[in-house]
Image: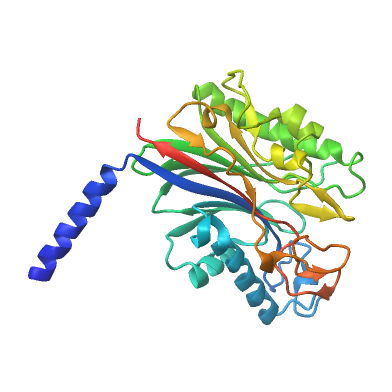
Amino acid sequence: MKKMTVLIIWIFISTALFAQQTHMYFYLASWNLENLFDNLDDPDKNDEEWLPEGSKKWDDEKLNYKIKNLSKIIRYMNDLDGPDILGVVEVEHQHLLDTLLNRHFCDRQYKVAYHESLDNRGIDCGLIYDSALFSLKNITPLEVKLDDGYPTRYILQVELEIKNFEEIIYVFVNHWPSRRGGESESESNRISAAETLNSALHKIYNEEKSPNIFIVGDFNDEPDNISIHDTLGASEYYCDSLLISSPKKLYNLAYKKFKDGLGSYMYKSQWNMLDQIIVSESLISENNLNYVCNSFELVKPEILLTLTGSYKGASRPSYAGNRYLGGFSDHFPVGARFVIKRK
């Protein structure tokens, strides 16, 4: 009876303290997991190379090692506590994310928002979020229709509520069409993705005056390319810059790093800032939910780095062609901190 009384008191005090919370910091990140496939044949997808008998010899040992490696980098984020929200791309099925979380993050109340797309390879976008901090309100897959009719990844729109603060946020996880065939030749496909995203944003702005919007992912374009800067309208942002308020304006938190010559992905020894975090104007104005200035970062622990060769300093991938390297991903994660205060 005494133990039960103590437990009830502890629950009451914890609930009261939580209810009195005046502010909360959270860490949002994005990462291209680079071909997180299972090794089971999906007859509707082009996944043959990712089977045990395929060109990659993708067996249980390699898959489990990949999952373990990914968990190390995810754990490294947010001062070794892991992100509170993580957008991920290049994932074949949700059960792979579930396995990752169940094996390596029992201390966090992570849940997954995910939706299969029509992509021929079967790699999709997902969102991992801490259900102790956020509650899921809605998932909306946004189909990107290309001029050539070729199926590509959906943009994943996820609506979350920040618990205890009753604040709604919208997170869009993107993996825009690649530059295969040439950057300029394929540019129209990424412009189509930007137009699809814009349509979804307009719907939100028609219903809310100042929504909290986070746009993350691998855009296969850089901050100054037409698809992002012009079509989407994501402007450069520097913490000491004077803003001209515009409720529908978007700001690219990756822009300063990009201008400094940094990138999340190396191609032919050149850095490309393909992975970005873009936010609505409300998140950098004087509101109750704000970006923590200069907190945007490329997540680059030493174990993730390629140490030799022409790709020295780049993120260490799982494969170079069909040669197994036992790495992590060919992209660096990006992350940023935000703070919410009680109104």
Nearest the viewer among 29 and 177 is: 29
Nearest the viewer among 148 and 57 is: 57
Q: Position of residue 318 (x, y in %)?
A: 75, 69
Up the image or down, 230 lies above or below 42; here it is: above
Is 334 displayed left or right of 207 in the figure? right
Q: Position of residue 114 (x, y in %)?
A: 57, 53
Q: How is the image coloured?
A: rainbow
- Residue in the image at 31% along x and 43% along y: 21
Q: Position of residue 75 (x, y in %)?
A: 54, 63
Q: Position of residue 289 (x, y in %)?
A: 46, 34
- Residue in the image at 46% along x and 59% along y: 110
Up the image or down, 207 lies above or below 100; here it is: above
Quadrant of the rendered image containing residue 65: bottom right
Q: Is residue 111 visible?
A: yes
- Residue in the image at 80% along x and 70% along y: 319
For the image, the number of numbered tags is 0
Up the image or down, 133 lies above or below 341; here it is: below
Nearest the viewer among 304 and 276 is: 304
The N terminus: image quadrant: bottom left
Q: Is residue 147 visible?
A: no
The C terminus: image quadrant: top left
